[in-house]
Amino acid sequence: MRSDKIKKGISRAPHRSLLMADGYEKWEIERPWVGIANAYNSIIPGHMHLRSLVEAVKAGIYAAGGLPLEFSTIGVCDGLAMNHEGMRYSLASREHIMDSIEIMAKAHGFDALVLVPNCDKIVPGMAMAAARLNIPAIILSGGPMLAGRDVDKNVVDLSSMFEAVGKCAAGVITEDELGKLESIACPTCGSCSGMFTANTMNCMMEALGLALPGNGTIPAVFSERIRLAKATGRAIMQLLYKGITPRTILTKVAFINAIAVDMALGGSTNTALHLPAIAWAAGLDLPLSLFDQMSRRCPHICSMSPGGRYHIEDLFFAGGVQGVMSRLLEAGLIDGDLITVTGKTVAENLAEVRVLDDEVIRPVDRPYHAEGGLAVLYGRLAPDGAVVKQSAVSPEMMMHTGPARIFDSEEEATEAIFSGKIKAGDVVIIRYEGPKGGPGMREMLGPTSALAGMGLDKCVALITDGRFSGATRGASIGHVSPEAAEGGPIGLLKDGDLIVIDIPARKLDVEVSDEELSLRRKQWKPILRKLDSPFLERYRAFVTSGAKGAVLEVK
């Protein structure tokens, strides 16, 4: 065992003495060491209950003959970090989490890992650590929040809350009504209740085979989640004994499976950042173009918030991620021969799975949309690609041409929207918010929700080299690459330039001649924000393009 180098032999008597100071008996120390990365904190609603889950994981590990050794990681709540400087730190925290787990695992010789995240960047950060370390590992997420209900019994969630701000600004609802909504939109612990980034990524862990069935959809407040935690503790010991490691599971085909599930679910655009990053950590290349290829093949069969009416609890009762995968396997859209953390193949896991609601999880031949949830656009405005959640775009905005309204920060755009300066037909351009330009590639849920709340989401598009929350809907096109700070064409745009959006044709262009763009490039000077953060300075120096997953690479 890896832990033998720390605990065995005469020279390790001091080490054993330190472990006895922790309260461990010698016979416990001799067991396999299973590190448990617990992302608990009292800030993130999705993480406030993780201590109880970790105790259940420990029970499962202990019962199966292992020694559970818990440690902590950081976690950023994207909702609380939204629409201000704090969002610059969110994506950057992903690599920090990966690195911190590597430090703990290698410094202490863990034989295996159970990784317990729940929200946005913590999930991929932990998965990247598992892929990089390649010792037996399982992801156990904290589970989704239940949706709220307003006085009229309408289902509400965090997306409703952000859009309500726009409604209030437009005079559609009062501040009193806004205040009542904020007390009910997020009623329980767990990751926010729609198919936003956190829940999308938790579903992706299950689709990749890196988490046990049920990981993506069992509600946080259900006792079944605790039982899943115990099962995870037992399962990690079986992986250890069998020598099944993350890279055994995380093959190129496994990622293609996950992308197919993502398309069927209509998941967050952030998967186009996080899945390539996890693949990169596993030594694989997952090009952005593959997402579009799978979108053409795999229909959108689950209409989930923010683009649809259903929430994660509905998906759970309908059959969960396994139900979606059973549909795709039957249609030949995923590979059933891949090994998973159950020790069984995908097909074996799905053998007795049944879909219990044909509206929540539609048959493949009766989808909500013929194509998958995401689309990748290319053109002179995005030579390396841009990403849109097409399943959340209204039909009238699938093709749109309109004048650019240029803003060099999220704050400028938000002020213009709330002050009524954006009109029907406009294309809002928010640039210098990419991985380097931000830095940190901020999410634009504030401006997109304001547009939706003010009733402009069906007549105004928003394009950015930043990114979007999974709670975003409308013609919101992000990850424009190359970004403005690296000389991308988005940095050359001027107010009034006609922007051409054609999602079916996968086109993102500007009606400006090549000659004019060349002239503008000669006059262009990048905007580099002054930073008071050495951490963000280091991040800016090493972060790559959004088209490459915004991973950090030493140049």
Image: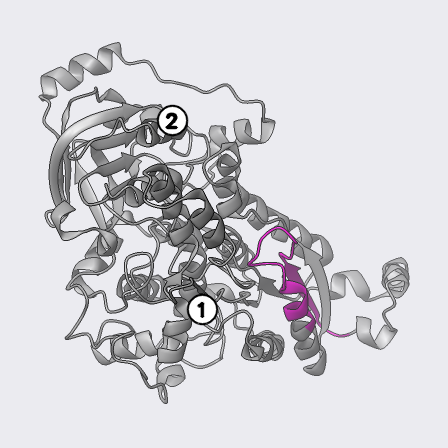
Label ID, residue 127: none
In the depicted view, which residue is nearer to us: 193 or 1?
A: 193
Residue at mark 2 to residue at mark 1: CA–CA distance:
34 Å
Residue located beneath label 1 in the image: 216
In the depicted view, which residue is nearer to us: 251 or 309?
A: 309
The amino acid on which the numbered mark 2 sits, given as a three-letter code, is Ser
The location of residue 554, given as percent across then percent down, is 49, 34
Which of the image's four quarters has the N terminus?
Answer: bottom right
The location of residue 366, given as percent across then percent down, is 15, 74
Q: Which residues are magenta?
A: 31-55
User: Is residue 120 among the parts visible in the rendering?
Assistant: no
- Residue positioned most to the top: 523
Local secondary structure at mark 1: loop
The answer to whether residue 168 is above or below residue 528 is: below
The answer to which of marks 2 and 1 sits earlier in the sequence is: 1
User: For residue 510, which quarter of the picture?
Assistant: top left
The location of residue 275, given as percent across then percent down, is 39, 54
Q: Residue at x 14, y 64 (%)?
A: 370
The amino acid on which the numbered mark 1 sits, given as a three-letter code, is Gly
The location of residue 30, given as percent across then percent down, is 79, 73
The answer to whether residue 365 is above or below residue 394 is: below
Q: Residue at x 8, y 21 (%)?
A: 513
Q: Residue at x 70, y 57 (%)?
A: 71
Residue located beneath label 2 in the image: 409
Q: Residue at x 33, y 67 (%)?
A: 310
The answer to whether residue 179 is above or below residue 71 is: above
Q: Is residue 329 a member of the stretch shown in magenta?
A: no
The answer to whether residue 413 is above or below residue 38 is: above
Is 225 placed left or right of 332 in the picture? right
